[in-house]
Amino acid sequence: MSAADADEVLFHALRSSGIDVHPSWSAIDDVVNDVDDESSANTNALLNIVRQCLCLIDATAYESLPRGFPLDDGSGTSVAERFRVAGRYASALIEVGGEQRDGDGFQQFLYPSASSARAMLKRLLELLPRRDVDEAVREAEKARVSAASARLGSRARAMVARSTKAEAAWGRAAGALKGFAGVAAAARAKKRTDDTTNAREFYTSRLKTNSSGGFFGNLSADTYAVPSVLEYAARVRAEEEAEEDARRLKFSGVVRAEFIGPDGKPFDLRKRGGLRGLVAEIFRLALEGGFYTEPRAIQACAELEETQVVDEDKVVESANDVENAAMDTLEDRIKARERDLEDVHRRIDEAMSVVSTVDDEIAACASKVKEAMEATDAKRALTAELESNYLLHKQAVGMVLATDRPVEESEAELNKVLVAAKERLEQLSAEWNAAKTPLLAAIEAHAEGAREKRKKAKNQLEEIEKWRSEGKDTSSLLRIKEQEQRQLLDQYEAAPKSVHRPSFVRRVNEIIKNIKKQEREIVKIVGDTRSVQSDINSAQACLERTYTVVEEILFREARSDELCRAAYKHLHGMHAGFADLIDKVEATGVARRSQTDLQRKLVEISKQPSNVERVARDLELMKRQIAELEEKLSTTAA
């Protein structure tokens, strides 16, 4: 692939990554020439592309980078500012790449070449971030869940709006539903629509506390009805309370529930008759709004209004009855069972924590008792030893101070005691030595076994660590492969689909043909070189043999013949001359190759004359500034 094709592919990849590259640029030389143009120094192309890449990598850190070099007005300030800008870009490139490579510095921005600019853009292209597929999947899943929640809420609002005499007026009040406060608002809205002429028939069904079939289960076969607003609000309120109770039990805390009354204010259960008072007020507002007109509903409301003070246990029991009546579906019963299980698990965890605390205290007490027993045994052993010494001393003193026994007899008895003690000590020492040998052998065997086990365990741990490191390397390699696959897929998706592929295929085929042709020529040249080298080697070997034979013959004849002696000297001179000639030919070849390289470098340097002139001008300005600073320093020192 030629350099022009490589530059075109590089620009295409930068445009696909979101970098603003001018459409007329098709080679790196265009960018470098734009940098060399002093009139466009504020907006030169190379710094603009590099700055866009750095901002894509980390916008917060590199947004403050200047957009180009300042205009060169010939003053020292502009030169210093240009060096400062180039230094900032070089530092940012090293910081992003993580390491400093050969050629990294301010010179690749002030005096760029095509090769350095191409390498720098390739490096930045490899560091550009890629969008993760998993993140897109999570966003899509989140959007799907949000759409499902919105559809569910719209269906609930539509169900409430259809359960009225006047759909338009009631639909406006349905948006205010929130707990029991929404029931009162809906009741007032329904009361205002009682005089509507085009209202249709509305049916409902009262549920008892022990009803198990739910609202639809208690309707007759010939009744047309939809769930009432009160039924809907009660179900929603029961579900919210069940979720709140589950959250409170889950976090092992008790939070006092605050009831909101039908008037929208906090409802005090103890001051206003407990749950019965709350239900009575709800029924009263419902009757005022025209929800229930049966005599049984009016009588139940009156009975509830008569009850003002209720025992706390009855309030809790009534709350449980209302909650059980509201949970008329299998899902609500499952939630209740889950709440009970969470409560049981919480209590079990508390009991287990208490048991573990008690076990810790028992272990501490046992250790303290063990220490006390050991101290008591030590003191007992010391006391027994002291007691035996005391009896021995007492017996000795009694024998010495006795007036009825001679001193010789006492000494003899003491000697007998000493001899018996020595024999006993020797016997104990022999027994200890006999018992110590197997114990030491057992200890040594146990230590050897322990060393073997530790060595084996160490080897196993090393193998485990090796497997773990291999697994980490494999997993990291798999992640890298997956990331490369995702990047290739993204590049394929982002690639333009309207590209004229036959032209690219034709160009690729031509490039492949040229490469194959070059390979054949290289193989032919290598073969010719090898054959020439073999001929040279054979000729050199033949020459060496010939020289050896001739030298030996002339050396033998030179002793007796003056002419052979002169021929021998000429032979040596000719050999040395040809050796010098070969060295000079080789040095000439090396010089020619160096000359070719220098000519190629001169051609490259001649392509960028402005860089040399700019470097010279900057060098003169820097020398001038250095001289001024030296003068200032000398003046200050004086």
Image (cartoon, rainbow, N blue to C red):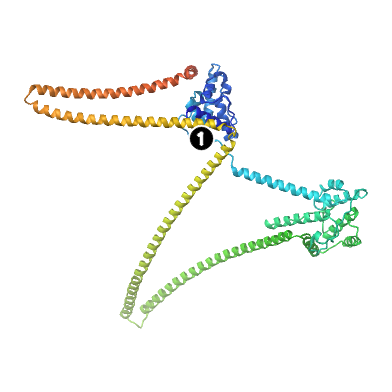
Q: Residue furthest bottom?
A: 404
Q: Amino acid at mark 1?
A: Gly
Reply above or below: 490 against 423: above
**Label 1 sits on residue:** 97
The residue lying at 41 percent from left, 30 percent from top is 517
Q: Residue furthest left?
A: 560
- In this picture, residue 401 sits left or right of residue 361: left
- In this picture, residue 340 sits left or right of residue 398: right
The residue lying at 71 percent from left, 59 percent from top is 335
The residue lying at 39 percent from left, 63 percent from top is 449
Q: Quadrant of residue 443?
A: bottom left
Q: List x then y, in percent, for residue 634.
A: 47, 18
Q: List x then y, in percent, for residue 328.
A: 77, 60
The answer to whether residue 373 is visible is yes
Q: Nearest the camera: 44 or 349?
A: 44
Q: Nearest the camera: 93 or 576?
A: 576
- In this picture, residue 39 sits left or right of residue 113: right
Q: Quadrant of residue 281?
A: bottom right
Q: List x then y, in percent, for residue 171.
A: 84, 47
Reply above or below: 526 against 475: above
Reply above or below: 513 against 405: above
Q: Nearest the camera: 633 or 94?
A: 94
Reply above or below: 116 against 445: above
- In this picture, residue 536 sits left or right of residue 63: left
The residue lying at 59 percent from left, 63 percent from top is 356
Q: List x then y, in percent, for residue 24.
A: 57, 24
